[in-house]
Amino acid sequence: MSDRLAQMSNTVTDTKDQLVNRAKEKADAVVGQTIESLDQQIEVLSERLEQLSNEARRRWQSVDSHLHERPYMYLAGAGLVGLGLGLYLKAKSSSSRDFT
């Protein structure tokens, strides 16, 4: 009886060890797949960021060259914005005095 109990105990221990090993293997596989998927997503995001950086650089060079070719347009635009803002603020301050 004692031998049979010892054998059953060994069988249970072996079965438990096999289940633990199988669970560890499956967990390692899932972690490996997750890491691989994340690596792929990081690579895709890195490529997209590089594309956006190149696009921004290209557009900035286009704006910069346009600014150097026609600076008067930007100066005139800034002057008109300043004039409009000044007239607006002057009108707003004079209209607020009318109510006091």
Image (cartoon, rainbow, N blue to C red):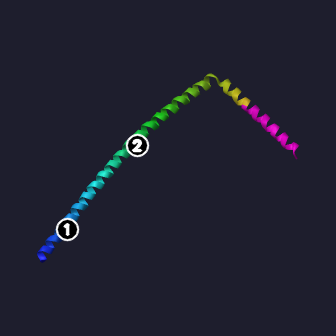
Q: Is residue 96 left or right of residue 68?
A: right
1 shown above or below 13: below
Q: Nearer the viewer, mark 1 or mark 2?
A: 1
Residue hosting label 1: 12
Q: Is residue 37 left or right of residue 54?
A: left
The answer to whether marks 1 and 2 mark residues whose Cβ atoms lie closer than 8 Å is: no
99 shown above or below 21: above
Closest to the observer, 1 or 74: 1
Mark 1 nearby-residue class (10 Å; few <14, some 14–19, many ≥20): few
> How far from the left and from the top, in percent, is residue 65?
58, 25
Residue drawn at (35%, 49%) of the image: 34
Residue hosting label 2: 42
Residue drawn at (27%, 57%) of the image: 24
Residue drawn at (20%, 67%) of the image: 13
Magenta residues, as a range? 81-100
Q: Amino acid at mark 2?
A: Ile
In reply to whether residue 17 is colored magenta, the answer given is: no
Give the position of the N terminus as an image quadrant.
bottom left
Quarter assignment of residue 60: top right
In reply to whether residue 85 is colored magenta, the answer given is: yes
| Dominant SS in magenta | helix
95 shown above or below 34: above
> How far from the left and from the top, in percent, is residue 100?
88, 47
Q: Amino acid at mark 1?
A: Val
